Amino acid sequence: MPPPSPDPQPTFSKIPFSKSTQLNTELVFFRRLFHLSRTDDPQNTRLPSQPRIQLNTPELLSYVSQDLQTPELDSFAPYLWLLSTPSYINISPLHHQLVKGRTIVLTEDPQLHLLWIYDRIFVKPVPEYLLSHAFWEFCFDGYGDTKASLPPEGREEAFKAACGFLRSWALLVRYRSDFAIAVKDGEGGSLLPKSDGGDSEKSGGTKITYEAFCDFIAPFADVGDDQVSPRYKYGEIRLSRLKIWSKIFMRNFHFEQFYGQYGAYFGRFYGPLIFLFGALSVVLSAMQVELGVSTGRMEAGNWVVFESVCRWFSIVTILLVAASTFFLIALLIRMVAGEVFFATRSMYRKRRGKGGDA
């Protein structure tokens, strides 16, 4: 018996794009059954772009939330004006990222999307399922609260994250050259899928053209800030600044760490410390020379003040050097202690779990 035909396409006000402009045709949504199915093979229940996740399961909903939402950056949103221009249009297209000398690094972590540091910018590829209108119907429209795949609050948060993410892509790809960069295979794959995944042509899908992408992404360019999550009210964010301010406002001392070795971690302190100690050395040497040639004239009032300033500046310098040394040693001890504590706790939980199984 053939599978039931899809229900008539209703009109939705929330889904930004229409079914006619979707760029992925692998999914179909049966509204009366509230069921997602694959168009290529009804027996295939895997999510496009992530075959580990099965359709119509709680794991799907959990995965979508993790794949799209940025909870830490959303909580930090009131302070993001300290790190970036307070406007979502502060996003350079892909070709201009190369003009700036940046390397485009593919990342699957939504919190790293559009964060940049030195000569690198992190960009999250567009998941294939977000290009499917059927997927948006299933996850975000909900057909009321009784059949919603996500609870109202969770559905709204995921919907805003998806809209904000795709709005950022409307700014990343503004020219045909940007589209060529996005579909080109790099380390880890391409940033945009090359085909819609359907059953046409020899390769198993119709090739996505730049014109088709423009038709799909155009509605997201008009999405307002009230329809996106707090993070996506901003564009590119400097990661080095975020690391500093997150320690103050979020009490997060390990936001997106990239250092696998102690030497690399402490190496970032060498430049500022060398500059500081070099400047202090020059000032102290100048003071020492001046005090040496001014011997015998210290009885005058101005020179007595100068001698007092030199004495206190020397003491402050000694304290500053001692404090910097103590800080680096304390930081090393804290890191080692944290690793030992984590390893001990993990071993304890592992042994406790084996004991419970026994």
Image (spheres, rainbow, N blue to C red):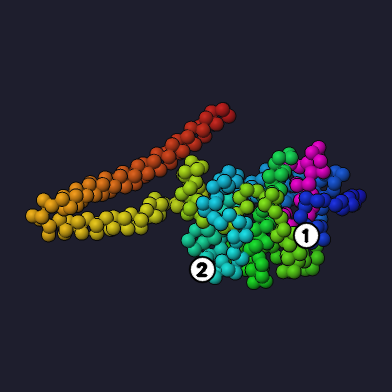
Q: Secondary structure at mark 1?
A: loop
Please tell me which residue lies in front, 64 or 230. Answer: 230
> Which residue is depicted at the point 16% across and 59% down?
289
- Which residues are drawn in magenta? 124-150
Q: CA distance from mark 2 to mark 1?
A: 33 Å
* Residue 85 location, quadrant: bottom right
> Which residue is depicted at the point 66% across and 67% down?
174
The mark found on residue 296 in the picture is none
Label 1 packing within 10 angstroms: few (<14), some (14-19), many (20+) = some
Residue behind mark 1: 22
Residue behind mark 2: 101
Q: Nearer the viewer, mark 2 or mark 1?
A: 2
Name the residue type under label 2.
Gly
Q: Position of residue 309 (x, y in %)?
A: 22, 49
Name the residue type under label 1.
Gln
Query: Was residue 189 drawn as part of the magenta stretch in this picture?
Result: no
Q: Position of residue 101 (x, y in %)?
A: 51, 68
The mark nearer the N terminus, 2 or 1, is 1
Number of numbered labels in the structure image:
2
> Which residue is depicted at the point 30% across and 44% down?
323
